[in-house]
Amino acid sequence: MKKEYLMAPGPTPVPPEVLLEMSKPIFHHRTPRFRQVFGEFNEFLKIIFKTQNPVLTFASSGSGAMEASIINTLSPGDKAIVIIGGKFGERFSLICKAYGISTIDVELEWGTPVDPQHIAGLLKDNPDVKAVFSTLCETSSGIVTDIKALGEVVGRTDAILVTDAISGLGADDIRTDEWAVDITVGGSQKGLMLPPGLAFMTVSEKAKKMMRNSKCPKFYFNALKALKSVEGSDTPWTPAITLITGGKKALDIIVSEGIDNVIARHARLANATRVGVQALGLELFALAAPSNALTAVKVPENIDGLQFVKKIRDEIGITIAGGQAQVKGKIFRVAHLGYSVTYDVLIALSGIETVLKELGYDFKAGSSLQAAQQAFLQ
Amino acid sequence: MKKEYLMAPGPTPVPPEVLLEMSKPIFHHRTPRFRQVFGEFNEFLKIIFKTQNPVLTFASSGSGAMEASIINTLSPGDKAIVIIGGKFGERFSLICKAYGISTIDVELEWGTPVDPQHIAGLLKDNPDVKAVFSTLCETSSGIVTDIKALGEVVGRTDAILVTDAISGLGADDIRTDEWAVDITVGGSQKGLMLPPGLAFMTVSEKAKKMMRNSKCPKFYFNALKALKSVEGSDTPWTPAITLITGGKKALDIIVSEGIDNVIARHARLANATRVGVQALGLELFALAAPSNALTAVKVPENIDGLQFVKKIRDEIGITIAGGQAQVKGKIFRVAHLGYSVTYDVLIALSGIETVLKELGYDFKAGSSLQAAQQAFLQ
């Protein structure tokens, strides 16, 4: 018998009670019944995004809301700063280019954080910059960005700050309003413990003002239309009903635990994971500012990183992620994200030890588990 | 005790075995396991759309694929013919305008069909038209368009024929390849018996050629990117995994019954519904070419159409749809779509009789049921 464990940074496991909620008979969305569910769902979202402003929900993957954050605020010919520390920062830049928006790409070595003062300097030298695009947790490297510091820098200018919090939301703190983030983008399949298919964005007053002048063409992802609908707990197009009914249940679980307790839990899991893999002599990839959502670990020399990830999935039953693009085969990424507790970290570490042993890597068996348990009991 | 019946033209009821499939533990999408499911899903889609060409799946509502059909083939300044017989034809025109595409709007009286020869004349007078947008079943009126005849007309020109088959697919016949439809658009929450959240589009060789020259900006709905991914049973962005695993189950049910048998079943249900309401002295709205997906019925004089729809939902437990826009309060729409059989028609008619009686409309009790049963037993 083999149990399956999903420990990749999205999709993440969905709690059984959420799966059961989604398996109830479907009902129509243009009804008081749906509006009630969606209204409550939207209030939960505000608590989790830490905003008083409306949060828009699109039926799409997270990339859809990333696109929405650009095409609703900017116009062709506008200039934007994009912080690129991995695949998802890069995506903002690609979307901008697709719409004729010129970008100042701030390319970081993967796994290292951005210096907010560098962004301040760029903003000073380029007063025509309309937006700064950042990533809370860069899923491809496991680094977390200091969004608070960026908010202080960008908030002093006329530019808006957009943060992709798709994989970080619910694991790393993001205080949308307090930190002056104008648009925080989220997705359903990460910390929110839902299947993929919903994407979110918050909209500050500053962002809303820019939206009125935006000249990028759009229809499905028209945010002003969605803002108008959400006032009446409605959506412009047919919503992904089951993901929202299940979503209400999932967000209820998060809000009942308390969003700050949820973040603290993720911090504990992340810390124990880091301590555990380091006890094996492994090196962390994003050491300078590791995210609470996932831990990226350098694959030891003489070990084939692709084989490692494949073996732990196919032989042990634990799905983790390998590296993408420039770090393909060089790192592996273990998520402790969403529906994840102490014991899941122990399972991950045990699986990692098992495959490392099989591949001939030398370490003292059980040392990662002991270290993690010590961290938990401290 | 009250049972709830969903008989609106989307979302439609989801079979319990599909709900259960979606409630299984989620798994990662960049795996052989997902690619196998998605590959089979895509083959089922080809059978249902009656095409040998690839069918693209987006995580979005149907409107997303409508937008994709436009922004991937046309460029700003292009000219298109849009057949508008209701809200969904109109949507094509609105999307075109949002992208700077000029439209020749062929506005029909709601509930009446388009004359294909009129389109032939327009194409002759406007040889620069790049695309003709049509609707298989216009959900807002219940009329079905003769797509075969349109295909003969448009197929002789350089223009592409795009058909919104969102509500018609699986109820009204659409032979994408045989009828020379270049792009057929579909959605999950109608005849395919799934929750909303997936949208589909077929791509002919002629459409694919146009895609290479299209200058509309796009990213999330980039069809050439999706075409490349779908070759490897993959998607450019995170797919709506549970809707696809459930979708494989739902499409399997359809393909096992046989797509032509499914369409014949819908024809029987639609016929019995029409015979039933006519036995009550009610008039059909889209008499000239009624769809198999839904039946639109004129609300009798002296009866408040909005109250009728509200009463049958809140008191009887049957969700049907009222009229939208110009026919608001003037028609009601009963769907017999997707997971729908003989007995569902009897339930709908019984509910309609009950509320009509309560509102003082005069008819012989049971006459609609008798007429429907006679139609079924013929």
Image (cartoon, coloured by chain):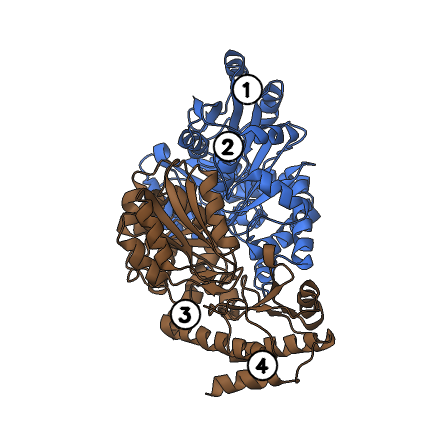
Chain colours: A blue, B brown
Q: Give the Cα separation between the discs numbered 2 and 3.
A: 40 Å
Residues flagged by tags 1 and 4 on a common chain: no
Front position among marks 2 and 4? 4
Residue B220 location, quadrant = top left
Q: Residue at x 67, y 36 (%)?
A: A51
Q: Secondary structure at mark 3?
A: helix
The answer to whether the residues at label 2 and label 3 have Cβ atoms under 8 Å apart is no
The disc placed on residue A70 is 2
Q: Nearer the viewer, mark 1 or mark 2?
A: 2
Question: Could one spot residue B155 in this view of the protein?
Answer: yes
Quarter of the image where one finds residue A20? bottom right
Q: Residue at x 46, y 50 (%)?
A: B59
Q: CA distance from mark 1 to mark 3?
A: 56 Å
In which quadrant of the rendered image does the C terminus of chain A lie? top right
Q: Position of residue B116 (x, y in %)?
A: 36, 59
Rounded to the nearest angstrom, the CA distance separating label 2 from label 4 is: 56 Å
Residue in front for this viewpoint, B157 or A14: B157
Question: Which disc, if any, is residue B279?
Answer: 4
Mark in front: 1 vs 3: 3
Calculate the distance from the C-alpha at mark 1 to the C-alpha at mark 4. 74 Å
Q: Quadrant of residue B329 in the image?
A: bottom right
Dots 1 and 4: beta carbons under 8 Å? no
Q: How many marks?
A: 4
Query: Looking at the picture, do discs 1 and 2 lie on one chain?
Result: yes
Residue identified by numbered label 3: B254
Within-10-Å neighbours for mark 4: few <14, some 14–19, many 20+: some
Q: Which residue is label 1 attached to?
A: A116
